[in-house]
Amino acid sequence: MAILALAEVIVAASEIKVPSLLPDLLDQFGLDLTAGGLIIAATGFTAVLLALPSGPIDRKLGPRMTGLLALAFISGGAILGASAGIFWLLLVSRVIEGIGGALIRVTVPGIVARWFPKERHGLAMGIVILATPFGGMMTFLLVPLIAATTSGWRGGWWAVAVFSFAALIIWALFLRLPSETDDSAETVQGVSDTTPSDAGGLRAALCNPNVWHVSLAMLCFMTVALCVVNFYPTFLNHEQGIPLIHANQLTAISAVVMIPGGLLCGLLTDRVGFRKVMVGGFVLLALVIMTIFQVEGEATIVLLVLFGIIGSAVPVACMVALPAVMGKPERVAMGMAVLTMISSVGYIVQPLLFGFLVETTDWVTAAYFITPICLVGVVFTALIGSSKTL
């Protein structure tokens, strides 16, 4: 579990280092917020393109090799980005990092589904997913400090490269799967020894309307929630004149709260079901986004705390819903491939759309334009059909 969490931390650091240093990147390359959003979105393009192939890759190579390959791409992409002297080379490096992120997102839930029985998926995924806000917290707090005391934003890129390579070594040496333990038959009850073909597993995922409903709900969540993750440090820096390091420290409050929030949402999902958690998460998210770009001082901290509490609700619930709608643990990787493909569109659309809206209107108006997507998310949540597996 700790190794899976470490991999999620690395993916979070790879992605969040850009928002944490976005004002510096805008100044260095002479960019506006729309172009800055493209740097953030670059990993999403790769995630969409590789989402479906990543499922068969995971099945063919196995979780250990898939994870090693993913961490190698993240480390290599960060090294290339740290060396980039022009904007387009920086974009290429982000695409390479995105390959690693796409592979990790597919393989980690599949490993969790192998290790834990269905009734414990909520808590298990809550523990793993809380690694993402922990990685975000550490990135918001440390990367701007590293950048300020080393070679600027490039220092942040080098730090991610080093840490991801260290995670690669740990993954290679210590990751164990149920099939490699003596008590695997007891650990993973009901998992068949036979594995369906990649084509069959992928077909089952693509033809399952519930997989699409879960995935589209996750897409709605990403499109709205990433307003804070991607742009709030820049908002605080540009609009309220808060120094970048302090702006990142404030934004990190939400990531700190997401850590216990992930556990709480996991337990709550096990208790009341994923649908109620998802609906509640969407309603509270809409309220936060409509107000967080209008407040200052203590109100900012209150809303960041609330955002941290609800920030894990929909992702945890979706990760619990997916194994349920897929039915068989060995097919979860294929379902995750579809979920990653669809939800990763949010990584592309959100920074480009919100950056454009801010440039053409203002921060508050942009937030009001994007918030109704939460209502669409509630609709897709309601469409997740009931069956014996749910």
Image (tube, rainbow, N blue to C red):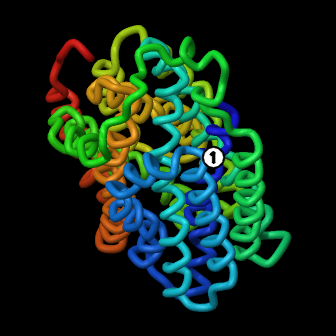
On the question of residue 117 being in view, the answer is yes
Q: Quadrant of the C terminus?
A: top left
Residue position marked by numbered label 1 in the rendering: 7
Q: Nearer the viewer, residue 282 or 382?
A: 382
Q: Is residue 152 left or right of residue 384?
A: right
Q: Residues within 10 Å of mark 1 (few under 14, many from 20)?
A: many
Q: Residue at x 60, y 72 (%)?
A: 77
Q: Residue furthest front?
A: 194
Q: Quadrant of residue 33?
A: bottom left
Question: Looking at this rendering, what residue extends furthest in the right direction?
Answer: 149
- Point 26% across, 35% down: residue: 214
Q: Residue furthest bottom?
A: 86
Query: In which quadrant will I find the N terminus?
Result: top right
Vertical relation: 297 (above or below) 386:
below
Residue drawn at point x = 41 percent, y = 35 percent: 315
Q: Is residue 151 above or below residue 332?
A: below
Residue 100 image offset from top left, x and y in percent: 54, 60
Residue 234 in the image, given as x and y percentages of width and height: 54, 64
Question: Farthest top residue?
Answer: 271
> Which of 92/239 is in front?
92
Quarter of the image where one finds residue 360: bottom left
How many numbered discs, if any?
1
- Above or below residue 299? Residue 281 is above
Where residue 274 appears, x then y in whole percent? 34, 21
For badge 1, the amino acid type reads Ala
Q: Is residue 215 left or right of residue 119?
A: left
Question: Residue 248's spot in the image, x, y percent?
Answer: 65, 55
On the question of residue 280 being in view, the answer is: no
- Return the residue nearer the eye: 137 or 242: 137
**Tag 1, which secondary structure?**
helix
Q: Residue at x 28, y 40 (%)?
A: 201
